[in-house]
Image (cartoon, rainbow, N blue to C red):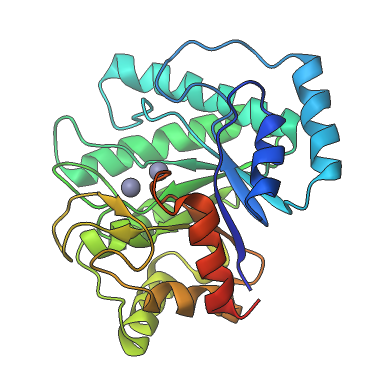
């Protein structure tokens, strides 16, 4: 079964995320290791690494993933691309020291040229970053996107092209966001359509490369290309796909991370709902 969890704040110290995750019953969690909206950040201190390690020993959280900065765009202009590569290398370095196995990354958005050109640029940057960090085991998980404008990753088939370009690098994986794939136009609300989507994922990325799921309902209709998260069961998606996912043995031990709004029923309510759907 998937490991139910949520995106958890690391305000006041990375190790505090563990306490917050435990308080709402997480089996997995996603954090930002640094401010996700700025380029320059302090390096990790030994104290931070030690505190994080100690907190992990006392927590019931089994897997942690990190979400990379929103500023990173490997498909960007020369200047943005270099800053993005540097930020990604630093993120992988922090995760290596914190024993976090996976970094989730938005594939980027094309600033000029076709999406094929953009994918080629992204793959070259990924290979460069993977080479520079070759002593680390940390994987980069590319996230499926809602596909608004020139954003890459709305069409799942793009990822099979990208995998070819990075020569099926073992440190490249994927994070499938349910709200995003629905907004991008994929149906998944019935048993049949959910399995069809899993078939598409199998074909283009391979199920063994899916190391994270993002869970939220969608305020917008299927195919809207707009990314608006909602509490589970309160949007256009409904509870069905979430129930099928947390009971799907093909995604054993894969973190299923809630990215639902923090207000209202909050993480606690959404986690309780997922547990009920899973039957424990
Ligand atoms: Zn994301
Ligand atoms: Zn989103």
Q: Quadrant of residue 96?
A: top right
Q: Position of residue 270 (x, y in %)?
A: 48, 60
Residue at point 74%, 28% (across, down): 97
Q: Position of residue 23 (x, y in %)?
A: 67, 47
Q: Is residue 167 visible?
A: no
Q: Is residue 209 above or below residue 259?
A: below
- Which of these two is toward me, 48 or 112? 48
Q: Is residue 75 above or below residue 170?
A: above
Q: Is residue 259 visible?
A: yes
Name the side, left or right, on which 257 lies relative to 183: right
Screen quadrant of the C terminus? bottom right
Name the side, left or right, on which 167 lies relative to 228: right
Residue at point 57%, 35% (across, down): 130
Q: Is residue 67 above or below residue 235?
A: above
Q: Quadrant of ligand 1?
A: top left
Q: Position of residue 126 (x, y in %)?
A: 46, 36
Extreme residue toward the bottom, this view: 192
Q: Quadrant of residue 33?
A: top right
- Which of these two is toward me, 20 or 87? 20
- Which of these two is toward me, 111 or 103? 103
Q: Quadrant of residue 50?
A: top right
Residue at point 61%, 31% (across, down): 92
Give the total number of marks visible in the rendering. 0
């Amino acid at each position: 079964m998937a490991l139910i969890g949520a995106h958890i704040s690391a305000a006041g110290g990375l190790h505090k995320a563990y306490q917050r995750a435990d308080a709402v019953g997480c089996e997995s969690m996603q954090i930002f290791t640094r401010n996700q909206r700025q380029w320059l950040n302090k390096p990790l201190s030994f104290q931070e690494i030690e505190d994080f390690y100690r907190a992990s020993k006392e927590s019931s959280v089994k897997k942690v993933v990190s979400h990379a900065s929103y500023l990173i765009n490997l498909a960007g202009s020369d200047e943005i691309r270099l800053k993005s590569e540097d930020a990604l290398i630093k993120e992988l370095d922090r995760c290596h020291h914190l024993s976090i196995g996976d970094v989730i990354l938005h594939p980027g958005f094309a600033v000029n040229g076709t999406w094929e050109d953009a994918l080629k640029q992204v793959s070259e940057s990924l290979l460069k970053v993977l080479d520079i960090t070759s002593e680390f085991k940390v994987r980069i998980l590319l996230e499926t996107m809602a596909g608004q404008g020139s954003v890459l990753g709305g069409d799942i088939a793009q990822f099979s092209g990208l995998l070819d370009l990075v020569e099926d690098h073992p440190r490249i994986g994927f994070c499938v966001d349910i709200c995003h794939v629905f907004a991008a136009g994929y149906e998944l609300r019935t048993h049949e359509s959910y399995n069809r989507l899993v078939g598409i994922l199998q074909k283009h990325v391979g199920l063994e490369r899916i190391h994270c799921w993002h869970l939220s309902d969608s305020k917008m209709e299927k195919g809207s290309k707009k990314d608006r998260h909602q509490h589970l069961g309160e949007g256009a998606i409904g509870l069905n796909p979430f129930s099928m996912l947390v009971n799907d043995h093909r995604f054993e031990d894969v973190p299923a991370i809630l990215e639902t709004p923090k207000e209202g029923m909050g993480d606690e309510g959404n986690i309780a709902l997922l547990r009920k759907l899973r039957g424990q």
